[in-house]
Amino acid sequence: MDFEFLPKLPKSNLDDRTFKDLVEECILRIPRYCPEWTNHNPSDPGITLIEMFAWLTDQMLLRFNQVPRRNYVAFLELMGIRLNPPSPATCQLTFYLSAAQNQELRIPRFTEVATVRTETEEAVIFTTDKELVIGNPQINYLLSADTAETISNQDLRNLTPSNRQWQNLQETLLFDEPSMPGNCFYLVLSESENSIEGNAIAITFKGEAARTTGIDPNNPPLQWEAWNGQNWVNVLRVKDDDKTKGFSFDGIPQPLEGADVILHLPLELPIVSFDTNYRGHWIRCTYMYPQETQQPYSSSPSIVGLVVRSIGGAVKATQCIRVEQELLGISNGKAGQTFELQSKPVLGRSVDEHIRIKQPGEISENPLDWEQWQEVSDFAVSTVEDCHYTIDSQTGEVQFGPLIREPSQLRQQIYQRGQVQPVGRIVKRDDRRADNLATYIPPSANDVGDIALERQYGKVPPPGSEIYMMAYRTGGGTIGNVKAGKITVLKNSIPYVKSVINYEDAYGGTDPESLDEAAIRVPELLRTRECGVTPEDFERIARDASKLVARAHCLTKPEHTTAGIVRLLIVPQMVNLNNFDFRRGMHPDNFGLSGELKEDIEKYISDRKPLGVQVKLEEPEYVGVRVRAEIILESQYNSQRDKEKIRDNLLVAIYRFLNPLVGGFEGKGWDLGRSVYVSDIVAVCQKIPGVRYLGIVELFSLSKLEFELNSELNSEWLLEDISQPEIDPGSLGLICSWQDDNPQLNSGHIIEFRE
């Protein structure tokens, strides 16, 4: 019996060898097991026996393929298991204006931006998740303080001109005189109805000519930050965005005309007052302690003018295409109708993405006047009056309620089970259950005894009615994990918008689930039914909480556990591994547990953990490793070109091996708490073609040192000077390696060639 409302999972063969393959395999084994047998012609009696046994084996494989695997797939279908669809990649897009506008500019939601289409690759399209408002910021206050620790009326000095003429100020010192590290000044932007969240702003500073401050103009010890509601976050993308050169105005012919500092404000930029009289959006510039390569301020910089304007804005985008008001077909009035969306797979639906049905004879052409239907995960408790439907996200198939022939007892049991809200139910049905479910009969049950009757699960669209999918999004997959700077093509022209770009890699895109992956997932689902009981359960739930969770480790050792508390070490996957260049390794900052990801995991686990159990999400203790190896090459690889190529291959191999995501000999990530030995590096290097043998191999550890500076917690990496035969990260540690941008740290691997 074939049920139309069940998912159609692919039936694969466990053994696809044919009769011919079996005969050939047996003949190939004759010289090994019976070398005296030399006549392999079809007329030989031995060959006849081989063919007979091959035929019997072929018949056995036929049944073998039909029974276990297919029965398992059929079992998954009866359970309603569907293969998970792909997930889309996300990124942050920055739009730039051709010129600053006097009025706000709105970039609508679902604006499409794509990568460049080439001869071999199709364009990858991203769609903005919300409307972007590029506002018209105004400066309310200019404040300064001795330190950036706390903000209060007593600590702040008001430098705001009384006439509010920001373009023509008296000479204003931004820091104390003489300047001390820790000095800062604040810009409080006006609170208006039009938010400037995510805006890229250009602050024009005008200064006096020929005024020296003593710093290196190309490397000023300044840090620009904005308050996002929880922390001060960096808003100066690159140092070159500070055209004032640290307010030295070095190389600017006419400083009085001003130079810009371009800041990219965070997507969350609330209006706050910090218990002061100054209310608005806060931006801070702090004079940091100079590093070894930086020079301090000999005197405070000063300005004589200040102007701010918006030059663009950033917004989150998802790799997808939005389809609107698609006609699925016309109803024939029969139960269990199915329709297919033109585009698939289908991404998760929002509130405005649903089906509406235009009834026969409907006069209004406004879709809002048509009958709205609701999507459900199944028809377990759908009655004949419920406007319900289901969508298979992977195949794009839309299913309306089926007509099922069933006995009254089964009917009541199905209803009772449907009252228990399953995890992932899309809509919450009306609660029709009585206090005693065991004796309650649904209102529509009018059958007598155990007579088999037909029951309609869900309403049937009337004959002749037009079925429209008002909107849905299609896309997803690893194809969306594009590199930074690749999304630059506007699909539709927008007035005053000059360009668009993604400054960071898009991440989070995954391919659709295969049948083999589902076969692994379902036993875990059946064992715990989404409940966290064992450490393995909590690890699985944490991985299921978000596609950005690469690994999760539940601590079980007595010294790491506390009664009633479950500690999970989370390793996020915030980079696109398919396009990642491992020649410089992967910095531990790529594995930071963001507040947004932490909130998603905690919210997902809270519905699946036992009552009274507290779950704490933490990061592993990352330990860096630097390798210095002497390599002796084969004689034919002694040219400079071959050496550089082998050097790159060695660096990639070592960086990949010492990696939390793809490290280790199995390539599944470095094991938590596992030490790294010199012999491990030797084994990795010897796999590279051209390497004859290795000389001296040394390991140096990098540890993270945290310290408090000006009441703020800071950290930096330190490299050990003495090599070690073994680097033990500790029971909570995880090995990683990278080439740091700071030349003083020198964390990259060193490959030396010897004759």
Image: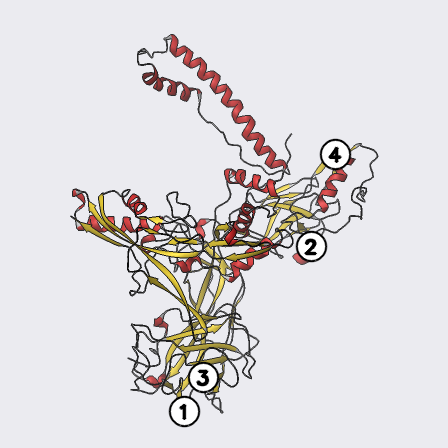
**Amino acid at pointer 2:** Trp
Residue 99 at least partly seen: no
Alpha-carbon distance for marks 3 and 2?
59 Å
Q: Is 251 above or below relative to 319?
A: below
Give the residue at x 59% y 48%.
Answer: 532
- Crowding at dot 1, Cα within 10 Å, few <14 / some 14-19 / many 20+, comes out as few
Q: Could you tell me residue 718's position as x and y percent? A: 34, 63
Circle nearer the N terminus (4, 3):
3
Circle nearer the N terminus (4, 2):
2
Q: Please state which of the two labelled residues, at mark 1 or mark 3, is closer to the viewer.
A: 3
**Amino acid at pointer 4:** Glu
Q: Could you tell me residue 63's position as x and y percent? A: 53, 23
Give the residue at x 78% y 44%.
Answer: 437
In terms of depth relative to the viewer, which is nearer, 378 or 519? 519
Q: Please state which of the two labelled residues, at mark 4 or mark 3, is closer to the viewer.
A: 3
In terms of depth relative to the viewer, which is nearer, 88 or 464? 88
Residue 613 at least partly seen: yes
- Crowding at dot 4, Cα within 10 Å, few <14 / some 14-19 / many 20+, comes out as some
In terms of depth relative to the viewer, which is nearer, 458 or 670? 670
* Residue on which disc 2 sits: 370
- Crowding at dot 3, Cα within 10 Å, few <14 / some 14-19 / many 20+, comes out as many
* Residue on which disc 4 sits: 406
Alpha-carbon distance for marks 4 and 2?
33 Å
Q: Could you tell me residue 213's position as x and y percent? A: 31, 83
Q: Could you tell me residue 741's position as x and y percent? A: 32, 63
Q: Is residue 266 left or right of residue 587?
A: right
Alpha-carbon distance for marks 1 and 2?
65 Å
* Residue on which disc 1 sits: 170
Give the residue at x 21% y 49%.
Answer: 643
Circle nearer the N terminus (1, 3):
3
Alpha-carbon distance for marks 4 and 3?
78 Å
